Image (cartoon, rainbow, N blue to C red):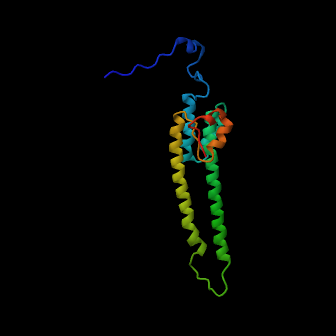
Amino acid sequence: MSLPVPPQIPPSALPPTSAYAANAQPYFPGAPTKDECTMAMLAHLLQVFSGFIGPLVIFLVKQDSKFVKYHALQSLIWQAAYLILGFGAMAIFFVAMFGSIAHNPPGVPHQPGQPPPAFVFFFPLIWLFWGCGWIVNLILGIVYSVKANRGEWAGYPLIGRMLLREYNPAAMSHPTAPTI
C-alpha cells in the first residue's frame, strides 16, 4: 500500500526562506508558534501544581504573545475565582462556628468537649469543596493544556469567550470558538 502524496504548494505562494529566522512567526497570521503553544500549555499545566503562581509568571513573561496571554489569563481568572470561593466558604465556616460557640440557646446546657454544631456540619462541606475544586482544577489543567499545545484558542466555560473577544476577535466567527 502506498502513502498518499502531500499536496504541492507553488513556490510563488511561499515566502523567501532567507528572509525569516528559524523561530519567526508562521506565514499566515493568527497561528501560534510552537514556542507559544508550549508556553500556553505550561500556563494551564502549572496551575495544577502551583496555583496562580505559574500562570502569573507566564503571563508576565510573555506579554508579546496574545495567544499565551489568552491562555495564561484564563488560568489566572480560574485560580482567582477558586480562591475567592474557597476563602468565602472558609469565612462562612468560621463565622458559623464561632457564632454557634458564642450563642448557646437558653435552656440548653453547654457540653464541654463537644464540637460546635456548625463545625460538625460545615467541616465536611469545606473538605468536599476543596477536594472537588482540586479535581476540577486537574481536569481543566490537563484538557486545556493539550488544546493549547495543539494551537487551539480553546476557552474555559464562562471565561474563554469573554477573553476571546479581547485577544482574538477574528476567532469568534470560527466554528470551533468557545460558546457559552
Residue at figure coordinates x 58%, y 28% from the top left: 31
What percent of the width, then of the height, locates residue 33?
Answer: 56, 28
Residue at figure coordinates x 47%, y 16% from the top left: 8
Could you tell me which quadrant the N terminus lies in?
top left
Quadrant housing residue 70: top right
Residue 146 visible in rendering: yes
Quick one: which residue is furthest to the left in this view? Answer: 1
Quick one: which residue is furthest to the bottom in this view? Answer: 107
What percent of the width, then of the height, locates residue 139?
Answer: 51, 48
Residue at figure coordinates x 68%, y 76% from the top left: 102
Closer to us: 26 or 60: 26
What percent of the width, then of the height, locates residue 104?
Answer: 66, 81
Q: Relative to residue 133, is residue 91 depicted above or below?
A: below
In this figure, what is the number of numbered marks? Answer: 0
Quadrant housing residue 100: bottom right
What percent of the width, then of the height, locates residue 35?
Answer: 56, 30
Q: Relative to residue 144, is residue 27 depicted above or below?
A: above
Closer to us: 33 or 153: 153
Residue at figure coordinates x 61%, y 40% from the top left: 72
Quadrant housing residue 163: top right
Residue 116 visible in rendering: no
Q: Relative to residue 72, is residue 22 depicted above or below?
A: above
Q: Relative to residue 88, is residue 178 depicted above or below?
A: above
